């Protein structure tokens, strides 16, 4: 089936804030005397805030109550949001603007499918809010990636069938979510190593739009 919609993951695809996530989680883990490094931070890609916290707390012997966990997540988010104030359109990743323009010119629907509850703030900071036809994010879902919910919601908002959608993702959890949704999965950056991605690229600057929209043919 023809691809009529492209759903973009946000963090790691449109803009990279993984360093800000790292700095914020590092402050929290240092305060709590929990070991945390950049390798562990890599495991947080595409994973929700509370699930990220669970991964970090798995390196601690202390049993945290639900309210303590909520407090830690809140503190982390305050630090992260303070860092997001630095974001600007200059941080948009290579190839993104050209791809958005090319997709619009071909009347392809465009959406965001992100685990982040900060999606509206991040899009405002980089000046891209108006460029997407629909936005599905961490505020509108119960189950985060690898559950397909966020991508199925984006397709529903666009009024297209899952099999008409191509997902662009930087995380294994997101590629798994795309495949679980019955969608085509394009892995970029670290997700270029995902065995179940239909297309694999280092970044969007190297994306051939004809290949993206004919992703079915590429796999066969
Ligand atoms: P927040 P994406 C994800 O965004 C990030 O990759 C992940 O590291 C983060 O934990 C998650 O958003 C939740 O973010 O704390 O802002 O709600 O890649 O799905 O766009
Ligand atoms: Mg991502």
Image: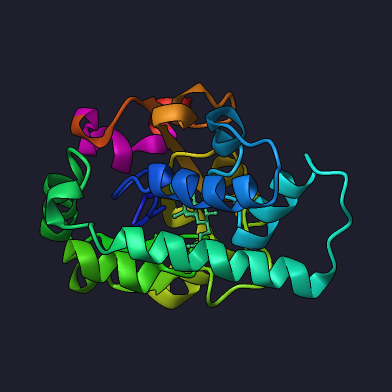
Where residue 95 sits, quadrant-wise, is top left
Left or right of 186, for residue 26:
right
Measured as percent of width and height from the top left, residue 200 is found at 41, 26
User: Which percent across, then down, holds residue 132?
Assistant: 26, 68
Going by the image, does 78 lie left or right of 89?
Answer: right
In this orientation, which residue lies closer to the viewer: 118 or 63?
A: 63
Q: Is residue 79 above or below residue 157?
A: above
Residue that appears at 14% across and 56% down: 89
Residue 187 lies in magenta, yes or no?
no
Q: Name the dominant secondary structure of the magenta segment.
A: helix
Judging depth in this view, the residue of 116 and 156 nearest the camera is 116
Residue 213 magenta-highlighted: yes
Q: Position of residue 57 (x, y in %)?
A: 76, 48
Residue 177, visible in the rendered structure = yes
- Above or below, 159 relative to 11: below
- Residue 152 visible in the current orientation: no
Colour pattern of the rendering? rainbow
Residue drawn at the location 29% of the way across and 49% of the way down: 15
Number of numbered labels in the structure image: 0
Q: Closest to the observer: 181 or 55?
A: 55
Q: Which residue is depicted at the point 19% across and 74% down?
A: 130
Magenta span covers which residues?
206-216
> Is residue 25 shown left or right of residue 188?
right
Q: In the image, residue 65 lies at what x, y percent?
A: 85, 68
Q: Nearer the viewer, residue 123 or 58?
A: 58
> Which of the 4 quarters of the picture holds residue 7?
bottom left
Q: Is residue 6 above or below residue 18?
A: below
């Amino acid at each position: 089936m023809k691809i009529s919609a492209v759903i973009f993951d946000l963090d790691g695809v449109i803009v990279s804030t993984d360093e800000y996530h790292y700095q914020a989680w590092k402050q929290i883990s240092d305060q709590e005397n929990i070991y945390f490094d950049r390798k562990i931070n890599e495991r947080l890609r595409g994973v929700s805030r509370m699930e990220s916290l669970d991964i970090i707390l798995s390196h601690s012997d202390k049993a945290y109550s639900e309210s303590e966990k909520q407090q830690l997540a809140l503190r982390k988010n305050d630090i992260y949001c303070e860092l997001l104030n630095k974001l600007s359109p200059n941080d948009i990743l290579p190839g993104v603007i050209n791809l958005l323009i090319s997709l619009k010119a071909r009347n392809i629907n465009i959406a965001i499918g992100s685990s982040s509850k900060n999606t509206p703030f991040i899009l405002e900071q980089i000046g891209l809010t108006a460029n997407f036809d629909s936005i599905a994010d961490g505020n509108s879902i119960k189950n985060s990636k690898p559950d397909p919910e966020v991508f199925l919601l984006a397709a529903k908002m666009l009024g297209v069938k899952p099999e008409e959608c191509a997902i662009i993702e930087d995380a294994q959890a997101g590629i798994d979510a795309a495949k679980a949704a019955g969608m085509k999965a394009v892995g970029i950056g670290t997700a270029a190593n995902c065995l179940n991605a239909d297309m694999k690229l280092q970044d969007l600057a190297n994306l051939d739009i004809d290949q993206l929209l004919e992703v079915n043919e590429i796999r066969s």
